[in-house]
Image (spheres, rainbow, N blue to C red):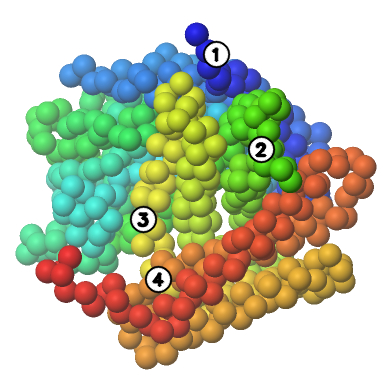
């Protein structure tokens, strides 16, 4: 029988590590953060030790089981959700590493690690198995409570999440509402007399249903801390319309005392069903019923919940977690794209097929060449590299802005805040679209084998397809960008971003080989600025937002072109003898992006400038 290609056995963590080292140290200058008081105890050595630990755990506990958790989907036996043992082992290893609280203060057991390094270290887990690593919403949940919770809520819930003893979720969507949070119907009513005096927070009883809850039920931790959006009825018993009536509640799966000890009482939170997904199959995704009476507390229906923050201010609190989650989704999409790139690069280097076309045509008598020698395969590899390494740089840049916001001087911190506001929709949406395209190209390089489960690239595509949907769909991110972010504070965030781009262009203008890139980026930036004004020229939101997605695509491509120009500058500063191939690869990816991708900006913005209503105005029956 003819031999078949075999899937790669060794996961290329070393390649990822060298890319992260360049971006962290040569591009973002992460070591300079150690001059700040919060990070003064750190050094390149401590950063490297964290990266080493995460790389090892990801290699040993995550990567070997990515296929296992895809094949062995979560099962509900009527009492509990059953997951593969590998998921529990990975969870325990991650919690034991201290990474859940890595960016937190020493006083609560954290490492006071810069978020830039924290994000880079977590990349190893995402590239090894997104299905396993996605069980870790706990950090975002606990971070929210550290900002908006009471001292006791922080002590009882957040600190136990940071240790891994408890885990956390975010419960926003409902079966009838989806992303329309103003239509949330879950109710929260005061839990009897004295409900406001409960030391864990004002105590309410919640009834309602929540959908698409990642990690909503499992046995990985002792307890699950649900953060739930619900509405408190008015004096007339009716729910306030819109988002201003939404409050936020802690609803633990199991009730606890003020010391964080389990009381032995199960809260009235019941698993209604598991969602069976295209990808991310290693993660439980659930429909939860709150207060249906399956687990009545003190003989009464209604899940016990504790108010976080002020009544009616829950959405503002939850957005703290949602914004973190959106950047996390961008990183997840990026790492899945990179996983596919690494797999297809390995395949292309080892798969013989076809012969080169010479002056006299193909010579069938000549031996086959590896497919990486074909120009079109190189095109697909370069596209993947430019998308995924560019997206990784963007996400780490956003992580660096988080550190600047929290530890920088007053003006620099406020600038970082505004830049994050503008870039967050791009950091989430751009990788989720174009790193998904990278996964499609990885399948294409594998040919028919890529469409089989013998090779990992089909799973990477399936896993990545979710990222354009959750934590705010593509259309929602686009409307947020064009409808709010570029306009907020009189456009100051957009002006700051343009100034950063212009500063990079000014430095690159002195480098002859980058001159053409400077001109192309300057033109794209002008087109985006003009389109922003044109979209809002009539002041009509319906016209302005009719083409928000093409606007976001053009905006994102312009941002990525800027990132690649800045990365190219950092590459040219390096001693080229240190890594000739890596430097050539980065410069090649930058060249590809400017030659093949950036020219798309004009086509996307054409409909934005014209406020084209083709899509918005077509009558329903015409479809």
Seen at 33% across and 57% down, the residue is 314
State the separation of the CA atoms marked 3 and 1.
43 Å
Q: Which residue in the protein does label 1 denote? A: 3
Camera-side residue: 183 or 447? 447
**Sequence-earlier tag: 3 or 4:** 3
**Sequence-earlier tag: 2 or 4:** 2
State the separation of the CA atoms marked 2 and 4.
48 Å
Which numbered disc covers residue 473?
Answer: 3
- Callout 1 environment at 10 Å: few (<14), some (14 to 19), or many (20+)? few
Mark nearest the camera among 2 and 1 is 2
In-image side of 447 versus 381 (left or right): left
Residue 436, image x, y percentages: 47, 46
Depicted 476 relative to depicted 211: above or below: below
Q: Which residue in the protein does label 2 denote? A: 362
Depicted 409 relative to depicted 138: above or below: below
Residue 170, image x, y percentages: 35, 44
- Callout 3 environment at 10 Å: few (<14), some (14 to 19), or many (20+)? some
Q: Secondary structure at mark 1?
A: loop
Q: Secondary structure at mark 4?
A: helix
Camera-side residue: 486 or 615? 615
Depicted 106 relative to depicted 324: above or below: above
Which numbered disc covers residue 548?
Answer: 4
- Callout 2 environment at 10 Å: few (<14), some (14 to 19), or many (20+)? few
Q: Which residue of the protein is positioned furthest toward the bottom in this rendering?
A: 538
State the separation of the CA atoms marked 2 and 1.
24 Å
Does residue 252 appear in this view? no
**Sequence-earlier tag: 3 or 2:** 2
Mark nearest the camera among 4 and 1 is 1
**Is there CB contact under 8 Å for labels 3 and 2?**
no
């Amino acid at each position: 029988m003819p031999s078949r290609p075999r899937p790669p056995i060794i996961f290329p963590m070393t390649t990822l590590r060298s890319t992260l080292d360049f971006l962290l140290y040569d591009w973002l200058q992460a070591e300079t953060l150690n001059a700040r008081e919060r990070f003064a105890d750190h050094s390149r050595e401590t950063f490297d030790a964290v990266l080493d630990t995460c790389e090892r755990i990801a290699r040993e506990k995550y990567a070997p089981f990515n296929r296992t958790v895809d094949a062995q989907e979560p099962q509900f036996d009527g009492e509990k959700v059953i997951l593969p043992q590998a998921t529990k082992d990975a969870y325990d290893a991650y919690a034991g590493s201290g990474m859940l609280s890595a960016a937190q203060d020493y006083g609560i057991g954290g490492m006071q690690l810069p978020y830039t390094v924290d994000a880079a270290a977590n990349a190893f887990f995402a590239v090894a198995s997104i299905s396993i690593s996605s069980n870790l919403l706990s950090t975002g949940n606990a971070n929210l409570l550290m900002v908006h919770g009471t001292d006791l809520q922080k002590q009882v819930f957040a600190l136990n999440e940071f240790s891994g003893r408890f885990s956390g979720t975010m419960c926003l969507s409902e079966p009838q509402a989806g992303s329309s949070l103003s239509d949330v119907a879950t109710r929260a009513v005061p839990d009897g007399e004295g409900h406001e005096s409960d030391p864990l927070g004002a105590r309410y009883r919640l009834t309602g249903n929540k959908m698409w809850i990642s990690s909503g039920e499992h046995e990985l931790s002792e307890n699950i801390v649900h953060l739930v959006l619900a509405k408190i009825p008015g004096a007339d018993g009716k729910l306030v319309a819109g988002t201003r009536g939404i409050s936020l509640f802690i609803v633990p799966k199991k009730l606890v005392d003020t010391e964080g000890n389990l009381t032995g009482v199960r809260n009235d939170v019941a698993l209604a069903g598991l969602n069976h997904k295209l990808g991310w199959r290693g993660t439980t995704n659930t429909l939860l019923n709150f207060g249906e009476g399956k687990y009545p507390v003190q003989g009464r229906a209604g899940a016990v919940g504790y108010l976080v923050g002020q009544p009616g201010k829950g959405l503002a609190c939850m957005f703290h977690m949602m914004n973190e989650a959106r950047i996390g989704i961008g990183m997840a999409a990026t790492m899945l794209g990179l996983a596919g790139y690494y797999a297809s690069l390995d395949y292309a280097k080892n798969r013989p097929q076809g012969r080169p076309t010479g002056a006299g045509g193909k010579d069938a008598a000549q031996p086959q060449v590896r497919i990486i020698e074909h120009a079109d395969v190189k095109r697909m590899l370069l596209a993947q590299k430019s998308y995924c390494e560019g997206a990784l740089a963007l996400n780490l840049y956003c992580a660096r802005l988080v550190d600047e916001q929290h530890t920088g001087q007053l003006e620099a911190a406020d600038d970082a805040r505004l830049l994050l506001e503008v870039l967050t929709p791009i950091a989430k949406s751009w990788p989720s679209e174009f790193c998904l395209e990278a996964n499609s190209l990885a399948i294409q390089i594998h040919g028919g084998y890529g469409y089989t489960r013998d090779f990992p690239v089909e799973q990477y595509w399936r896993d990545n397809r979710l990222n354009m949907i959750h934590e705010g769909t593509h259309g929602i991110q686009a409307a947020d960008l064009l409808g709010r972010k570029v306009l907020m504070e009189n456009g100051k965030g957009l002006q700051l971003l343009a100034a950063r781009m212009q500063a990079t262009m000014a430095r690159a203008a002195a480098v002859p080989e980058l001159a053409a890139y400077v001109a192309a980026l300057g033109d794209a930036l002008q087109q985006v600025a003009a389109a922003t004004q044109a979209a809002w020229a009539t002041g009509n939101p319906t016209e302005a937002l009719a083409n928000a997605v093409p606007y976001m695509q053009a905006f994102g491509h312009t941002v990525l072109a800027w990132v690649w120009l800045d990365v190219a500058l950092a590459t040219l500063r390096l001693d080229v003898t240190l890594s000739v191939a890596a430097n050539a690869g980065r410069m090649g990816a930058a060249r590809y992006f400017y030659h093949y991708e950036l020219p798309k900006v004009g086509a996307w913005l054409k409909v934005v400038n014209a406020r084209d209503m083709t899509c918005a105005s077509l009558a329903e029956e015409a479809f």
